[in-house]
Image (cartoon, rainbow, N blue to C red):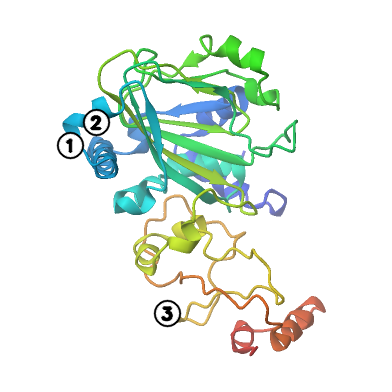
Amino acid sequence: MEIEDWASAKTLAPLYRELKDLHLLEHVAELEAFGFTVLPPDAVGPPEQHEAVREALLRVACERKQCSRGELANVFRDGQELMRFMLWDDPLFEKVILAPAAVGLIEYLLGTNCILSLCDGWLKGAGDASTGIHCDWAQFEMPTFPPEPYTANFNYLLSDYSKEDGALGFVPGSHRWRRWPSPEEAEYWNDRCHPVEAPVGSMIIWGDHTWHGSYPRRTDGLRLMMLGTYCRAHMQTQEPFRQTVTQEALDRNPLRFGRLMDVHGAFPFGKSPPRPRSNRAAGEDTPPPRRRSYLSLLDSEPAAGKVRLRTEPDYGVYDAAFAEIIAKKSKGMKIQFPDVYRAKA
């Protein structure tokens, strides 16, 4: 059927059309049926991209561990490490978190206004290190889960994955159980989960309901992976992207990047309602794209000033002029955005 911009479907309709154009509907079905899916390397990027990201991850690991490339395998022997907060270590990582196929599937799970929660690297050496069966649901006060995930992620494989290489393993269909595994279930599935066997450049995508773990690496060398986790827009991120993003990073990336950084997020509230952000640097006195507007997965045009760094307000100040404008709007009175920008504290 023809997918129109039905108001009831909100931004899902344009997202669905782009997922269809990208030949990703089978992956949507796999997420729905089994709780995870694997993108082939050519859906993620060209071979030179995979090699460049791999080299960047190894460079960062050497810098943080203060060792040579040849020493890394011994550094991680019988161990593994999730290297936190890597986004700003190489501009190449900024492109990875914008990968259209990955972001499109994650937006299908979380909504098109989701934001980036973490961007990490993961290195595992040969030995007994593994990850037990678990799910990524972190609302610990909720022992049963809602139908929709709150977070989702991609694992970008930067080495070949097989069971012997220490691959991730999944319990297919476990996302439908909507609960954590018990200790007994986790032990049962540890060596019975389905290992993902995929080449360098693949991406595994799943939501936070799906049970998974990893096998120990029984081959020499390192298992390499880059991880991006996204969350719904109302949530606290695991890493401080809004607080650390630079104007240069916003300028060189498309509009979607600013949304992932949560630059225009309304929270937290102060005594006054949140203000729209001006596009004055772009030569226009109009607001930036609303959080509920759809931004194409395929847009790669640099924002170049259309997204500005967040200016933190004085949360203790009550802005009477701005509050009056908001009150007029609530009564159905038409207001112009320049009026909003000119409101004085």
Label 2 to label 3: alpha-carbon separation: 45 Å
Q: Residue at x 65, y 17 (%)?
A: 183
Q: Which mark is residue 281?
A: 3
Mark 1: few, some, or many residues within 10 Å (few <14, many ≥20)?
few
Using the rendered view, name the quadrant where residue 320 is placed: bottom right
Q: Nearer the viewer, residue 212 or 283?
A: 212
Q: Residue at x 60, y 52 (%)?
A: 236
Classify 204 as above or below 129: below
Q: Are marks 1 and 2 in contact (CB under 8 Å)?
A: yes
Q: Which mark is residue 18?
A: none
Classify 146 as above or below 339: above
| Residue type for callout 1 | Ser
Regarding residue 208, the answer to whether it shows in the image is yes
Classify 275 as above or below 19: below
Residue 173 percent location from the top left of the image: 62, 20
Residue 110 percent location from the top left of the image: 60, 44
| Residue type for callout 3 | Ala
Residue bearing the label numbered 2: 72
Residue bearing the label numbered 1: 68
Residue 209 percent location from the top left of the image: 63, 30
Regarding residue 16, the answer to whether it shows in the image is no
Using the rendered view, name the quadrant where residue 254 is placed: bottom left
